[in-house]
Image (spheres, coloured by chain):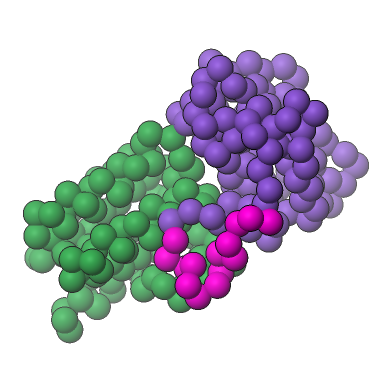
Chain colours: A green, B purple
Amino acid sequence: MKLTSREEGAVVVLEPRGKIIGGPDATVLREQVRDLTNSGKKKIVIDLAGVDWMNSTGLGILISCLTTLRNSGGELKLARITEKIESLLTITKLVTVFDTYDSAEDAISAFSGD
Amino acid sequence: MPEISENKIVIPSQPALIRDIDEFVEAKLREWGVADTLIADIAICATEIVNNGIYHGNKEDPQKLVTLQLESGEDEIKITITDEGDYFNPDEIANPIAEENLLREVGRGIFIVRQLMDNVTIRQAEGGGTEVTFTKKIA
């Protein structure tokens, strides 16, 4: 998995690419969110358009990112999840836990009311 | 390094080798003409069970192996995955969709496999590890 990021005002958009299925590179996303939170960035969007699918390792990492942010008063939003990931979120009922948006821009805008 | 022979791949319990499992399974299923959406479901499940074998069964001991065997039947794919660790009883896992467990980072693998595949069997392997077999209709 490769990870790039960009900043839109106070919001950081993370763009992982490749499947999130385990192994050493899977933790990069979790570490990046932890580092951003520690440096005061607490509004984060993960744009998942580049992730075809993930397994429960990936879901666990998304939960870890969510918990890290919530514990420090921040917020996580997901954007552009693929059909396969949406199906996994539904099966596992995690669809009730995550805020998901059709585009990164929609997710960024959703922060503005905070 | 992975050892590949026909429809079987054997790996030492190193987490990075999960990529080799995914590549092997996807390539074989594509060769057998399985639809892309089913390939993804089967690969998700294969990587779930192999990760369980690497981390929970074999406890990342590189001396212990995880074996994945693929079989192509008339209308279904069958996968058998075996580790060399202690037998793992799936009944001991907390229900991952219970409200109080939703924010747990682990414990969803077997649940997902049971949801996505048609038949899932978990039993003690002959050598004492865990053997997981699952099938998926492809026609």
Residue B20: give x, y in percent of width and height: 55, 27
Lateral position of residue B9 relative to residue B125, left or right: left
Q: Main secondary structure of the magenta part?
A: loop
Q: Is residue A94 above or below residue B56?
A: below
Instruction: Name the residue rendered at 66%, 43% in the picture.
Output: B88
* Range shown magenta: B91-104
**Left or right: B108 in relation to A11:** right
**Percent from the top left, x then y, of residue B25?**
65, 34
Q: Is residue B48 above or below residue B112?
A: above
Query: Where the C terminus of chain A falls, by quadrant?
Result: bottom left
The residue under the point 35% across, 65% down is: A79
Q: Can the viewer see residue B78 in this picture? A: yes
Q: Which residue, as the protein is rendered here, is positioned at the far bottom?
A: A113
Residue B54 image-quadrant placement: top right
Q: Is residue B132 magenta?
A: no
Question: Residue B137 location, x and y as percent?
Answer: 81, 51
Q: Is residue B39 visible?
A: no
Q: Quadrant of the N terminus of chain A?
A: top left
Residue B96 sits inside the magenta stretch: yes
Count numbered badges in the picture: 0
Above-or-below relation of A93 to B64: below
Q: Residue at x 68, y 38 (%)?
A: B87
* Residue drawn at 28 percent across, 71 percent down: A107
Is A85 in front, or is A66? A66
Image: B109 above or below B65: below
